[in-house]
Image: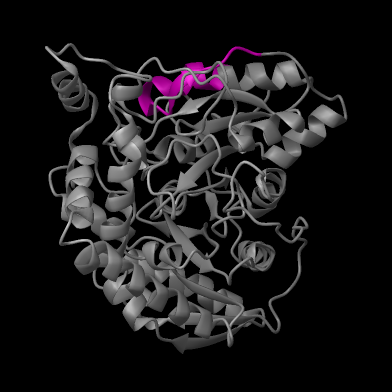
Amino acid sequence: MIDTLRLTAEEAWRLVDAREISGAELFAAYRAAIDDRDEELHCYLHLCDDPGGEGLPIALKDVIGTKGIPTTAGSKILEGYVPVYDSTVVERLKAQGLRILGKTNTDEFAMGSSTENSAYGPSHNPWDPSRVPGGSGGGSAAAVSAGLAPWALGSDTGGSIKQPAALCGNVGLRPTYGAVSRYGIVAFASSLDQVGPVTRNVRDNAILYGIISGRDENDSTTVDVPAVAVPEPGDLKGVRIGLPRQLNEAEGIEPGVKAAVDAAIEKAAGLGAEFESCELPLSVDYGLACYYLVAPSEASSNLARYDGVRYGLRSVGADFREMVMRTRDDGFGDEPKRRIMLGTYALSSGYYDAYYGKAQRVRTVIKREHDELFERFDVLVSPTCATTAFPIGARAQDPLAMYLTDLLTIPSNMAGLPSMSIPCGLSDGLPVGLQLIGPHLGDARLLRAAALFEAARPWADRWPTVPGL
């Protein structure tokens, strides 16, 4: 029997290459695990049949376009939509022989921090199914944590890979903006969206990043990226690490989270890392407000394409205008409607310069503030999330409290920098994430530093109590 809960993607790949198991057997093992455990966890929105072959299975967040496989972005307005082409990242996965297990649950159009905004119901955290797995990519994070996929892809706009990785005890990478193609990805905020890997460990993460990254002629924002070697063990001597005070001392950081992060930092310091406190005052003070002007503005533009004409839901109306209005009213949930209205207002005549235009200028300041720190440091470190996984429903009626969940992940995203979350301990039995931030196109450096932190603070013996086991 194949123990999918404890199997890393690299180990699975080795077993298939060595013909100790077949690709079909591996795929079947993950499907059996899904059958056993996903009824309670609700990680998947759609499951795929085994297409044959010997490659590894992979789960994909349901904003990633897949030819012949439903892609709903967690929304009723795209219910039944089946793309006629693959996104670039899926083409690259298939070129390496990877096979799609299924599409994972997400907050609607990736708008949320708990997966509770999915039109198809929330996902649940494998460490405690009464709690959220984070969002918007909670389905991918929960699937990897529960052994329902060896690895997965998510997308990260304000923290949608990093924050679920923290709450579910995974490794999640948000690459440098432009390092991974967005072609074929359901758009939320085009200047922020970025696809990235969700894995059990840093080595798997580096392997998957290496498969999906690089220039794509179909996406003009992509760039050639330095090659990433799979990180090898080593020490932390000479690694210069900045501790931004505003990220590490932010209001609301739970004592258990701070204790786990401090312990990881102390362990790394004992292995030779050089730590120094530093400042990111404007990035943290204005990052959240800046994000909630830029992202909704771009969302209001991107989501205008859902009009009931070209694809997805179409509601009945007496004329074209009424049909469009009813389609959007029936198809969009509360959170997309909230962000569309906010973004449309920020882009409207007379307010554009005061809101969206000013937010873009602040964004430049945020990037400059980060760049100055990377003249002194190799990486920056902080908690990924101020809290551990919170109970389902606890913040669902308070949008501001939900938005604050991404307070620590947003600044580096606004700067377009690579960042990731790795597990660093437990607080009351729930995972705590450590956020590492690297310089522009410093994804390889970031992954190496993460691997060294991981070796200093091993996680391999930590497993959730998964329903069905």
Question: Which contiguous range is marked in magenta?
Answer: 32-50
Q: Nearer the viewer, residue 229 or 270?
A: 229
> How many numbered dots are placed on residues in this image?
0
Q: Nearer the viewer, residue 49 or 34?
A: 49
Q: With respect to residue 410, does 313 lie above or below?
A: above
Residue at x 75% of width, y 31% of height: 95
Residue at x 86% of width, y 24% of height: 19
- Taking the image as drawn, is residue 305 in sight? yes
Expressed as whole percent of the image width and height from the top left, the position of residue 113 reads: 31, 47
12 is within the stretch colored magenta: no
- Would you identify the image quadrant in which residue 112 lies? top left
- Taking the image as drawn, is residue 253 in sight? no
Residue at x 63% of width, y 32% of height: 90
- Would you identify the image quadrant in which residue 85 lies? top right
Residue at x 44% of width, y 81% of height: 369
Expressed as whole percent of the image width and height from the top left, the position of residue 26 reads: 70, 22
> Is 230 placed left or right of 2 in the picture?
right
> Is 448 placed left or right of 171 in the picture?
right
> Is 405 placed left or right of 449 in the picture?
left
